[in-house]
Amino acid sequence: MRRHLTKYLRIAAAAAIAAFHFIPIYILLMVSFKKGSDFSSRWCPPSYLYLDNYIEVLKDGDLIKAFGNTVLITVCAAFLVLFLGAICAYPIARIRSRLSSLITNIVLAVMMIPSLSVIVPLYTNMLGLGAVNTYWGIILILATYNLPMSVFLFSNFIRNIPDELDEAAAIDGCRDFRIFFSVIMPQLQPVIASVLILTGIKIWNDYKYALYFLQDNDMETITLFISKFFSDFSVELNEAAAAAFLAILPVCLLFLFLQKYFITGLSEGSIK
Amino acid sequence: MKKILASIALIALALAAVYAGGAGEDSNVQTLEFAIKETGSTLEAYEAIVEAFNEANPDIKVEIVSYGKDYQALMKTKMAANDLPDLFTTHGWAVALYGDYLYPLNERNWAEHLLPEIRSTVTDYDGSIVALPMDIDITGLICNDDVLAASGVESRPENLPEFLAACEKIKAAGYTPIHIAGKDSSDVAGLFSRLSLSILTMSEKQNYAQELLDGTFDWTKYDEVGSFVLSLVENGYTNVDYLTADKSGTYRGLAQNKVAFAFQSNLTMAEVKKLNPDANVSMMEIPGYSADDSSFLISGERDAVGVWKDSENLEAALVFIDYLAQPENVLLVAEAYSLPPSMDNAEVTDPGILSILGQIDGSTVTNHFDRQYLPDGMWNTLKVYSTSVLSGESTVSEGSELMRTEYERLKN
Amino acid sequence: MKRSRSLYMMSIPAVALITVFVFIPLVSGIRISLTDWNGFSQSWSYVGFKNYLNLFTDSRIVHAIKNTFYVGLGDTMLQNIFGLAYALLLNHSFRGRSVIRAIIYLPVMVSSLIMGYIWFFIVQYDNGALNDIIMLFGHDPVDWLGSGTRAVNFIMVITSMQFVGQAMVIYLAGLQGIPKEMYEAPMIDGAGTMQTFFRITLPMLRASILTNVILKLIGGLQMYDLVVALTNGGPGFSSHTISTMINYLYFDAQNAGYSAALGVFLFIIIMVSTITVNKIIGRDDK
């Protein structure tokens, strides 16, 4: 009896917590389905069906374009973050030397630093490289600023892979790169998932870099697209809410379908 | 795992190829970048003009880019790198901020048609016209006449004593006399700068215009502006959330007939009408200082387009600017925002604009306080001053001291 | 196993990217920090260390630094405490558990900028959802963001609420990694729930705690998007963080030299403290 009671209490508590965390999304939904002239409480659902906010946001296709841009940028940058992060981490995890700890320290520090602190000179340099308003420019920037996290997680993980595996391969005559690709890489699956989840979301949701380095409207990403709706000059809060909801919908759906992988991936790789 | 990585790489490459393929362009066409700050109906007007231009000029392609609210920040990074768009809108800062980067337009045929009120605001100290203004920005206060009537205020206040009396009545009737959107520091600065004109430069009794211009102004006198605004707050004439409200809050308050006055530009009227087409909001003149003083309006630059002087496509950009200066195009942009056009050859038929022209006719018109009396770069100081004084971070006299030091630093 | 130094070849691409996009700009940043450059004009002059000296006497900057560390440390604590509590709760299996886990994790997927705008709908004075509730109980509405201290606390709580799901998931994994047998021995000894928690669970979660602390600290120290959307640094200058302050100084105050000095100062402070912390933890690890 007592057992049952604690069980129900637990479910109730969990449900209450979930409801609490759902409030922002709920409010967003309510606002997005209301007319601008509807001043009723944001808790109350509208008493009418009103889809104009969504139609207005979708009608010129810019959201779809922004979505395509964001997918392109995220996929490329995430690939770089994974690949370069993994190969960078291997030597620093395997060699104990001053150089390794120097690289580790640099990586850790860069991870912590507010990236805005170098935005001014960075912009000037990017311009010199002809990298402003190019996909490769933003991809490299986003990859660079997410690399530290990747190197950090990969090197922690690789340290826990027994060195004997490498040795066995070396005895078989494999050279360094072969060892990495044939022995280490297959072991990395869980941490790849973690890195992908942690940095992929950051890249997808990036606002600061896209703001400065992608000024061409044809290249704008989803966050930029949304921020325009909340611009100082406009009052279309309801449309903005609809746009925001449409923007988070795909990632939320993706998450819901892949939830299992998300959670196991994030957990296995990040706590080793 | 290799497979996963390889397939990600493949997808990336494929996507990149698709995008690269789409971006290929005809090399004979000169492409001009035209950066626009304005959004909404003004942007739509520019888009219509650009579309017509591109059709008529197959060898020039004008591309509009709109940076939204971060426009100014982005333009500054571009100025820092000396790499500006070929054409861009100057949003009130043609001379002060962008002047050094703009190509002088005095020689263009349309220059002689510019109305004198606006010609002076886009002319720099050397006498160069640095931008093509499209309209004349006329501002005062935004006022909701229904709220005034419901509170028993019979006529719009013409001077500050009347204004305070009206506020008292409005408050007593349960409405909010003044809405301040304090989340936006430029809104607060707009309030201070309008009242600075009333209190310091537009009055017959107390007039420091000359001192402000020649640099002999005693900044302790500025305390009166700060104290006046604080008294509005202390007397409960402002919205409760005067520090945190955003402009959409002002729009909602006016649209719901809860708010009487807002120290904002004419854009507010259009936005309020979107929320409530029946709202009786309109522009009124800014009250004068004392009972003997009369009210006045502010005129300035709003929509203006400049050409980057180092543009590689200067000739093409000038072709476009001349096209933009045609009376029908000027009118299109001006009407988008219900403002009088900048050229004497553009014929106004819009009743709203005609009524604004009528309003200007009988009244005193002056330029913005900061653009007229303060050195370049001081608009920002005014923003800092306004938000610090309003939030109580600085006292009124500390605020005036800040204004003095910055005024002296920037003046030299 | 003995390694040849040539293995470091594999680190080169990543190190090169970090050099080009982080360290070279940092060096230019140091140069800018010694000037009075306004951020856009073509002319400027060197002013020595004046910008750095001004940093320490500027109360707005000191306040922004305090806010950043307050939010950074505060949200690290909140997220770890609540993340762990949620994980303990959801570690028990019951129906609907995965739905609840998903809902708590979902906000992590949303951009902080959008989250900030959504929260503005909630905490706004006029028509805000929170005030609707307050008024339901007969209280007067409150201007939640009207005081700087309260605004900063809101920023801390909102960011914690958004990202607590991430901490929770990492703790859940940690909990699942604790072998069942570990709990059996003390059970026999008759240890209470609390004692088990402190003597077994917590020490076994060391790796999860470390990961979470690092992740959350990064998030907190970089705080930018949420502040922009929620308070824009106000009222006055009371809720600025270092990132929003750098942005403000550069673009609004037209004081790029000063802005760069703040950036460089911060870069060095964080670099030094991270390396120190890493030394301490690293030694412990081996």
Image: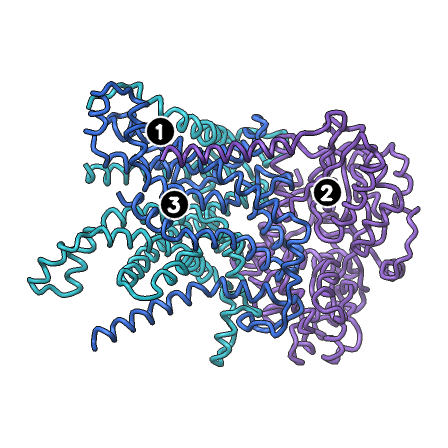
Chain colours: A blue, B purple, C cyan
Task: Give the chain of mark 3.
Answer: C
Kindly identify the amino acid type of the residue bearing the numbered disc 2.
Thr
How far apart are labels 2 and 1 at the CA level? 48 Å
Q: Quadrant of residue B75?
A: top right
**Residue type beneath disc 1:** Ile
- Which residue in the protein does label 1 denote? A87
Q: Nearer the viewer, mark 3 or mark 1?
A: 1
Q: Position of residue C52 (x, y in %)?
A: 45, 37
Residue at 31% of width from left, 61% of height from top? C86
Report the side of A111 relative to B61 (left or right): left
Which quarter of the figure is the N terminus of chain B placed in? top left
Around disc 3, counting alpha carbons within 10 Å, would you say few (fewer than 14), some (14 to 19), or many (20 or more)?
Answer: many
Above or below B21: residue C82: below
The disc label shown at residue C218, or none: 3
Tell me, yes or no, whether dots 2 and 1 are on the same chain.
Answer: no
Question: Which type of secondary structure does the marked residue at label 2 adopt?
Answer: loop
* Residue located farthest toward the left when viewing the structure as drawn: C189
CB atoms at circles 3 and 1 under 8 Å apart? no
**In the image, what residue occupies the spot 25% across and 28% down?**
A94
Q: Which numbered circle lies on residue B90?
A: 2
Residue C189 screen position, x and y as percent? 6, 62
Instruction: Tell me the mark number nearer the camera, choosing from 2 and 1.
Output: 1
Badge 2: residue crowd in 10 Å (few <14, some 14–19, many ≥20)? many
Q: Where is residue C176? Give x, y as percent.
A: 24, 53
Residue B397 makes an appearance in the image: yes
| Picture coordinates of residue C168, whole percent (x, y) | 33, 56
The one of A10 and B178 positioned closer to us in this rendering: A10
Q: Is residue B192 visible?
A: no
**Along the line of sight, which residue is nearer the eye, B292 or A101?**
A101
Do marks 3 and 1 both belong to one polypeptide chain? no
